[in-house]
Image (cartoon, rainbow, N blue to C red):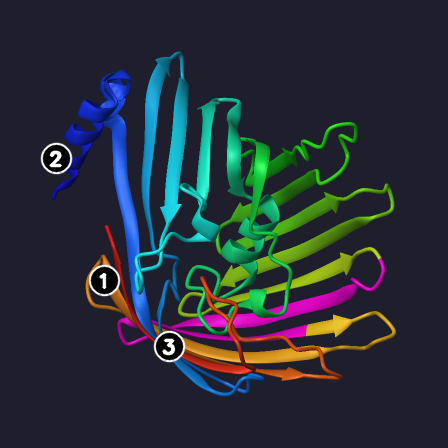
Amino acid sequence: MNKSLIAATLAAVFPFAALAQSNVAIYGVVDAGLVRETGGPAGNVTNLSSGMASGSRIGFKGKEDLGGGLAATFLLENGFNADTGAAGQGGLLFGRQVFVGLQGGFGAVTLGRQYTPYYKALRDVGDPFGAVSLAGRAGNLMATNTRTDNLVEYVTPSLAGFTADVAYGAGETAGNSAKNRTLNGALAYAQGPLNVQLAYHRLDNAAATDRTRNTLLAASYNFGPVTAQGGVAVNRGAGTASSRDMVLGVTVPLHTGKLLASHVRHDDRTIAGKDASQWGIGYNYPLSKRTDIYSAYARIHNHKGSGFTVGNATDKGSGDTAFDLGLRHTF
């Protein structure tokens, strides 16, 4: 079924949206492959998994010109598992993202379930595996704060290379407006080969002192054939949740594909001293503009029973070592 036919079908089912169908885009990712995991407490396992490089998804996005430089936007993105057909994100209909907003010369305001500024800084700037979240991803050891519900986000226009991204996630708890709320923000500078972002994420819980705070400084520099990336994070939380984390890596063109390599460290600043480190290497080879194959290998060294596992874009993994080999198609 082609995109035009799908759009026509949606217009027939939802006639109230028919006027805006001309600027609605349908897109998606189907990603599946083999994962070999070793070092887990239950033993070694080989899986046919979905969404190792990118979570499998289907999405709808649109933009309507309101005049005077103002436009309305929306995005609906459903996640699914290509290996079983089951819904992703715990069965949510649009568990990946869903938001509506306005954009213009002032910037952009969006409301809904969205990626946090902190996650985007780590994914887009600090982590070489961020766009292809294979076994070597920094998120195996570092906080990612991927999505937040009830999020109101504002992104400024670029001024001399600087942009700001601020967001507030309502906790929606009766009698306690602070409980489960999130405060997020990122200040970015991108000019030429340099990209730097300072990001912050805070989650408040029941008490004023019961909160988790993550601060990340991420940077990348394109030297031409090689792009170097890295990030340093300071994490503070209630009780024992405090650490210093670091990721360093490179992206290197190799033949017509890309070689990825990174090293990640988790320095536990509590009395338990449950440190961990990870080495990862991967390769992404395009078969066309929309189809690629990929492979990756990563190993975590856990200390004092820290228990981190090697995961990917969709799965947290079960062991301290993993090998990924898969195929991804985008449309």
Q: Residue at x 66, y 48 (%)?
A: 199
Residue assigned mark 2: 5
Q: Which residue is mark 3?
A: 47
Q: Nearer the viewer, residue 284 or 252?
A: 284
Q: What number is the disc on residue 291? A: 1
Identify the residue at image location x=56%, y=82%: 320
Q: Where does the image place residue 24, in percent across and percent down from the top left? A: 27, 30
> What amino acid is found at the position of numbered circle 3 in the picture?
Asn
Residue drawn at (49%, 56%) of the image: 193
What span is in magenta?
239-265
Are dots 2 and 3 in contact, CB under 8 Å?
no
- Dominant SS of magenta comes to strand
| Numbered disc 2: secondary structure | helix
**Position in image of residue 277 (x %, y %):** 65, 79
On-image quarter of the N terminus: top left
- Image quadrant of residue 230? bottom right
Using the numbered discs, state the Cα–Cα distance from disc 3 to disc 1 in whole angstroms.
22 Å
Residue 173 picture quarter: top right
213 relative position to 330: left or right:
right
- What distance separates the C-alpha of mark 2 from that of mark 3? 35 Å
- Residue type of the residue flagged with mark 1: Thr
Relative vertical location of residue 328 with respect to residue 103 in this rendering, above or below: below
Q: Secondary structure at mark 3?
A: strand
Query: How many other residues sit within 10 Å of disc 2, few (<14), some (14-19) or many (≥20)?
Result: few
Q: Nearer the viewer, residue 19 or 78?
A: 78
Q: Earlier in the sequence, mark 3 or mark 1?
A: 3
Q: Is-magenta flag for residue 189?
A: no
Q: Which mark's residue is nearer the viewer, 3 or 1?
A: 3
